[in-house]
Image (cartoon, rainbow, N blue to C red):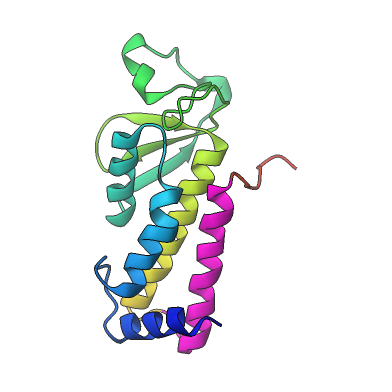
Amino acid sequence: MDSVLFAEFLLWKEHPSRDRSTAFLSRIYREDIGPCLSFTRSELSQLIQRAVENNSLTIEPVAMSALPMVKASALECGGPKKCALSGLSRVCRHRIKLGDKGSYYYISPSSRARITAVCNFFTYIRYIQQGLVRQNAEQMFWEVMRLRREMTVAKLGFYLTDQG
């Protein structure tokens, strides 16, 4: 176990918050969250990061047979065959919605994996903040490390597909 990382975690755990200025979260933003949510469309990347932090992002599957025709004005939102985040031609089986805004953005499987990895991390951090995690500090730390690994693996382009 890295004693510096563990010490940063223990210090954060005394007063858990989502304040980026703590050594613990500052490191995770710099090493994991930032790179994981860094996409070609940087402005949209920033909006996604804020929505994830605020727990206001929705990801939902797209019914492939019931897809409407994509209007020309919706090109920036991607489409069933173009990821709104990377701009690459990919089959997009999911779409995201940021907060209560009306626009949906179609995302590729690799973009979805990256976003959900960060969401999983924030969910666990919120659980710790709310006192819902009933584990000792070392067990919590190892779960945080597992979630960091999940972000790293997703950022490298590895993800599980829904297809067997």
Above-or-below relation of 62 to 4: above
User: Please, which residue is most extreme toward the right here?
Assistant: 164
Task: Identify the image quadrant of residue 95.
Answer: top left
The residue at 45%/87% (across/down) is: 137
The residue at 50%/40% (across/down) is: 111
User: How would you classify the magenta stretch by its main secondary structure?
Assistant: helix
Examine the rendering and report whether any part of residue 135 can be seen: no
| Percent x, y of residue 146 | 56, 68
Is 19 or 98 nearer to us in this picture?
Answer: 19
Span highlighted in magenta in the image: 133-156
| Percent x, y of residue 119 | 42, 56
Examine the rendering and report whether any part of residue 37 can be seen: yes
Is 133 or 157 nearer to us in this picture?
Answer: 157
The residue at 26%/83% (across/down) is: 15
- Magenta stretch holds residue 154: yes
- Magenta stretch holds residue 115: no
| Percent x, y of residue 158 | 63, 47
The residue at 41%/46% (across/down) is: 37
| Percent x, y of residue 65 | 57, 21
Is 25 or 132 nearer to us in this picture?
Answer: 25
